[in-house]
Amino acid sequence: MDHNLVKLGLLAIFGIAMAHLEGVVVVYLRKVLGMPDSESNRESVGKFPRKYLRIEMTREAATIVMLVVIAWLTGGSWVEKGIFFLWTFAFWDLFYYVSLYILIKWPPTFRTIDVLFLIPVPWIAPVWFPIGVSSLTIVIIAALYFSGIIP
C-alpha cells in the first residue's frame, strides 16, 4: 500500500480524534458557564472571565502546535509538511463541528455565528465558512493526491 496514503489516513484519524477531544472540552466549558446548548459561541466570549479567555487562548495555541508537530514528524519535504498540516487541520476543524453537533446538537444551522479562533483577536463567522473551507481543503488535497500531482 502507498505509504503517503497510509499517512493521510492516519492523519485524518488523528484530526478527527483531536476534534472530538476539543468538542468535549467545549461542551464542558459551556456547561460550566451555564450556556444553553443552542446559544452561539459568540455570546460565550462575553461571559468568559479575562483569566479564562487567556487560558483558552493557550489551549488554541497548543492545538496548533500539535498540528504543526504531527505534520513535521510525518512529512518529508517542506511541501509535504505543509500539505499534511492543512490535511490534518481540515479534518480537525470539520469534525469539531460534527462532534459538537453529535454531542449537543450545536450548531443548530450552518448560519450560526461562531468564534472560530481567539488568537490574536476573536475571529467570528458563520459556521458554514470553516466547514466549507475545511471540506474544500480535504477535496483538493485528495484530488491532487489521486491525480498524481502530490506524490
Image: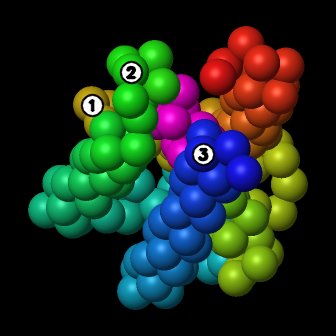
Residue 98 appears in view? yes
Question: On the image, numbered disc 1 is attached to which residue?
Answer: 120
> Which of 145 and 34 lies nearest the eye of the viewer?
145
Q: Earlier in the sequence, mark 2 or mark 1?
A: 2
Question: Quick one: SS at disc 3?
Answer: helix
Residue 7 horizontal/vertical position (percent): 57, 49
Q: Residue furthest left?
A: 51
In the image, residue 89 lies in the stretch drawn in magenta: yes
Residue 3: assigned label:
3
Question: Quick one: SS at disc 1?
Answer: loop
Q: Residue at 71% of width from left, 80% of height from top?
A: 104
Residue 77: assigned label:
2
Q: Residue at 32% of width from left, 45% of height from top?
A: 73
Q: Earlier in the sequence, mark 3 or mark 1?
A: 3
The amino acid at mark 2 is Ser
Q: Nearer the viewer, mark 3 or mark 2?
A: 3
Span shown in magenta: 82-91
Q: CA distance from mark 3 to mark 1?
A: 37 Å
